Image: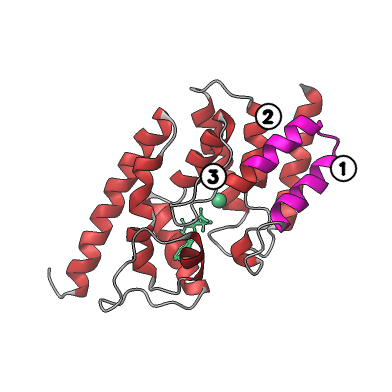
Amino acid sequence: MKIKKVQVDKTIAFVKHQLKNAEGGHDWFHIERVYKNALLIAQNEDVDTFVVQLGALLHDIADSKFHNGDETIGPKIAREFLVTIKVNMEVIDHVIHIIQNISFGGGNEVQKFKSPELDVVQDADRLDALGAIGIARTFNYGGFKNRALYDPKVPPTLNMSKEAYKASNAPTLNHFYEKLLLLKDKMNTKTGREIALERHAFMTQFLEQFHDEWNGRK
Ligand code: ADP
Ligand code: NI
């Protein structure tokens, strides 16, 4: 037990350091929120808490979005780190599977790996894409990419392939329709779904008001 606590603390220090200069929506504070939500959700699930902790902490260690689309860097960095702190191989393999399979990727990908621990971390990550924080993160990312807030002439594209989703340069508001509003129906756990519904309702209200203000109503 004590060894695991030391390993989790070392992982926290490593992740904080790695994400020092990260974009505001994918920084240490995102990881911290996901970590806390994952532990909250895990209370009602039959899971290995240690795997959930390491998966949550390392899930965005080198997001492909910020590494020219390369999806192998994150798993590689995570594996090398976990080996240096002597985590057992079975746990390492599970954590790497979580990192490789957590992403939405347009919503049409077949998820190649499933486990209750991935379900928990994925729900926790999805919750941070919803609600007030979800809205803030989304516009921060759009600003980071120098995208328009909204353009009525560019409608959202539903059911995008992973490639199209990743290549999209559409205005930020489209992301709500292309991903964020779809998440509530993709939640894996009861706890996750309940929190997602509340956050979804808040986003819907935000979008209504956004369109009203855009169109000069109110
Ligand atoms: P996934 O790869 O599973 O879609 P991401 O890490 O890309 O997950 O998404 C995390 C968050 O980053 C989103 O919830 C959103 O806030 C922001 N984000 C990602 N892609 C976009 C985008 N195209 N426009 C605006 N925000 C985005
Ligand atoms: Ni994340």
Q: Which residue is mark 2?
A: 50
Q: Which residue is mark 3?
A: 33
Residue type at the position of mark 2 = Phe
> Which circle, 3 or 1, is nearer the viewer?
1
**Which residue is at a point 76% across and 52% down the rendered structure image?**
76
Does residue 103 appear to the left or right of 177 in the view shown?
A: right
Nearest the viewer among 119 and 126 is 119
The magenta stretch spans which residues?
Answer: 73-97
**Percent from the top left, x then y, of residue 184?**
35, 43
**Which residue is at a point 34% across and 67% down the rendered structure image?**
173
Nearest the viewer among 204 and 170 is 170
Does residue 184 appear to the left or right of 68 in the view shown?
A: left
- Split into 4 quadrants, where in the image is the C terminus? bottom left
Q: Residue furthest left?
A: 218
At mark 2, the secondary structure is helix
Pointer 2 or 3: first along the chain: 3
